[in-house]
Image (spheres, helix red, strand yellow):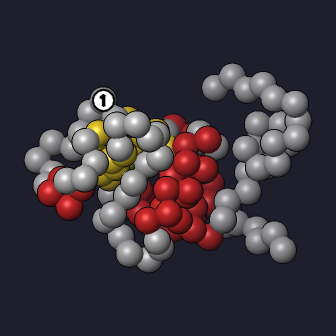
């Protein structure tokens, strides 16, 4: 994955070789470790991802979690392919159906966390 930025991105992991994850992002990665493909939807005129399969966090929080994980290169959100056989009836208000999956980088991060644990930054 090619990376270029001004060096002020903070937590994408490309410049400082450090990746900062929130507890909510960690939870979502753990969910994807257990279920490799999850449903995601969006409105036709809005690229904000919507995930309704879990209620630990609000819809808005999940949208932010997914957007951050995608920006960090840990997940892929693909609206070109929906989950085969999945009942999207709870998502009837959203015409664009897709999937969420870990990227290779996301899988590597999960493996590293499993082997090495993680540090907590205060």
Characterize the local packing of mark 1: few (<14), some (14-19) or many (20 or more) Cα atoms within 10 angstroms. Answer: few
Residue 27 placed where, x, y %?
51, 67
Residue 30 placed where, x, y %?
47, 63
Report the residue at 28% width, 48% height from top.
Answer: 94
Report the residue at 34% width, 49% height from top.
Answer: 40
**Is 104 situated left or right of 82 in this image?**
right
In which quadrant will I find the C terminus? Answer: bottom right
**Is 30 situated left or right of 53 in this image?**
right
As rendered, which of 74 and 104 lies closer to the eye?
A: 74
Report the residue at 46% width, 40% height from top.
Answer: 47
Instruction: For mark 1, give the secondary structure.
Output: loop
Q: Please tell me in which quadrant of the rendered image residue 34 appears.
A: bottom left
As rendered, which of 94 and 37 lies closer to the eye?
A: 94
The residue that disc 1 covers is: 80
Q: Would you say residue 73 is visible in this rendering?
A: yes
In which quadrant will I find the N terminus? Answer: top right
**Is 22 situated left or right of 89 in this image?**
right
Given the current orientation, which residue lies at the most extreme right position? 7
Total numbered circles: 1
Residue 11 placed where, x, y %?
77, 49
Residue 18 placed where, x, y %?
79, 49
Given the current orientation, which residue lies at the most extreme front position? 45
Report the residue at 49% width, 56% height from top.
Answer: 63
As rendered, which of 116 and 92 lies closer to the eye?
A: 92
Q: Would you say residue 101 is visible in this rendering?
A: no
- From this view, report whether residue 62 is shown above or below residue 8: below
């Amino acid at each position: 994955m090619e990376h270029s930025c001004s060096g002020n991105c903070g937590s994408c992991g490309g410049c400082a070789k450090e990746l900062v994850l929130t507890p909510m992002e960690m939870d979502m990665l753990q969910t994807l470790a257990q279920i490799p493909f999850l449903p995601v939807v969006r409105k036709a005129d809005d690229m904000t991802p919507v995930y309704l399969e879990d209620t630990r966090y609000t819809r808005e929080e999940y949208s932010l979690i997914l957007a951050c994980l995608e920006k960090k290169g840990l997940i892929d959100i693909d609206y070109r392919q929906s989950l085969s056989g999945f009942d999207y009836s709870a998502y009837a208000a959203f015409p664009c159906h897709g999937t969420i999956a870990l990227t290779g980088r996301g899988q590597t991060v999960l493996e590293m966390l499993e082997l090495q644990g993680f540090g907590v930054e205060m």
